[in-house]
């Protein structure tokens, strides 16, 4: 697939997620259409507290993340925060509570259905300091040097142009601004049949970079003090939805032994970096 085909596949999958209120990138042991309680259990397993989960409007947490970047971003009152790939707004709403009414949170997502859901959630929760914009994270609809903090949760791995994403992040951050992202990386190369699987790509696996390459891409952009501040293995029960597994087995000939290797090859990391 070329870059445009990849983006279209990702957009279509997450439009479906938004429309069915289900999770495809994180939770999902019985199907891609996961119930709310499964999304809650998954979110707890990757670092969200019960208080955080219960503080957002119903439907804002679809279990799509792979970590809790807000918890480690050290957000301060009055800061401007940008969320790359904001989905239904879960992390945006958590950030909004930390920056207060004197601060601002901007969520950017390329899927209109997700944007609509996020705006509905904003209205339900009365979040006046949150704004959602339609756009691609490779071409952010955000002014130069206008943001204090960038967060992102299990989204950059879906981009076929990760270097461009980090360049855009660097552009919109103010001098002294910081990057705090949770994402999926690989510890070793995946079998070719998995790398070629569309299902594995939209499931946050086949598009992931090797850990060292991911960190190097951030550093090459100009970020300083690039550090992994947390890393976890994705819980086996939640690492892939059954629909994704079936698609890889049936449509792309992925062997079950390769799936076992896959589970050991993916990792969630939290990365912090600074723009000097």
Image: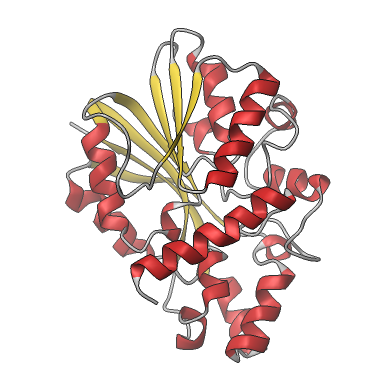
Residue 71 lies, in percent from the top left, at 53, 31
Q: Is residue 69 above or below residue 176?
A: below
Residue 272 lies, in percent from the top left, at 36, 40
Residue 75 appears in view: no
Residue 170 lies, in percent from the top left, at 24, 39
Is residue 58 shown left or right of residue 233?
right
Residue drawn at x 63%, y 90% is 255
- Nearer to the camera, 221 or 137: 137
Q: Is residue 195 above or below residue 103?
A: below
Residue found at the very far top of the displayed protein: 102
Is residue 217 shown left or right of residue 270?
left
Image quarter of the N terminus: bottom left
Residue drawn at x 66%, y 67% is 240
Is residue 83 shown left or right of residue 112?
left
- Nearer to the camera, 244 or 265: 244
Residue 27 lies, in percent from the top left, at 70, 56
Residue 48: name its quadrant: top right
Please name the colour scheme applied to the rendered image.
secondary structure
Q: Is residue 81 above or below residue 256?
A: above
- Nearer to the camera, 179 or 10: 10
Image quarter of the C terminus: top left
Residue drawn at x 43%, y 13% is 103
Q: How many marks?
A: 0
Is residue 101 shown left or right of residue 31?
left
Residue drawn at x 67%, y 76% is 245
- Nearer to the camera, 103 or 180: 103
Residue 237 appears in view: yes
């Amino acid at each position: 697939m070329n870059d445009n085909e990849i983006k279209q596949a990702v957009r279509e999958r997450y439009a479906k997620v938004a429309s069915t209120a289900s999770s495809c990138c994180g939770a999902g042991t019985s199907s891609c259409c996961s119930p709310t309680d499964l999304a809650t259990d998954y979110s707890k397993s990757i670092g969200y507290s019960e208080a955080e989960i219960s503080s957002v409007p119903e439907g804002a947490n679809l279990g799509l993340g792979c970590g809790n970047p807000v918890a480690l971003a050290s957000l301060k009152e009055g800061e401007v925060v940008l969320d790359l790939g904001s989905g239904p707004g879960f992390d945006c709403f958590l950030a909004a509570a930390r920056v207060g009414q004197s601060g601002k949170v901007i969520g950017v997502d390329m899927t209109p259905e997700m944007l609509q859901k996020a705006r509905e959630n904003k209205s339900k929760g009365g979040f006046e300091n949150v704004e959602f914009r339609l756009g691609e994270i490779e071409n952010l609809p955000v002014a130069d040097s206008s943001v204090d903090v960038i967060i992102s949760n299990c989204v950059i791995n879906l981009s076929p142009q990760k270097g461009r994403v980090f360049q855009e992040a660097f552009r919109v951050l103010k001098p002294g601004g910081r990057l705090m992202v949770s994402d999926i990386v690989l510890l070793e190369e995946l079998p070719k049949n998995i790398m070629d699987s569309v299902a594995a790509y939209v499931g946050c696996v086949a598009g992931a970079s090797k850990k060292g390459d991911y960190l190097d891409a951030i550093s090459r952009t100009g970020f300083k003090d690039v550090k992994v501040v947390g890393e976890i293995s994705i819980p086996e029960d939640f690492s892939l939805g059954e629909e994704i597994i079936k698609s890889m087995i049936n449509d792309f000939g992925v062997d079950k032994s390769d799936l076992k290797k896959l589970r050991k090859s993916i990792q969630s990391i939290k990365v912090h970096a600074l723009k000097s």
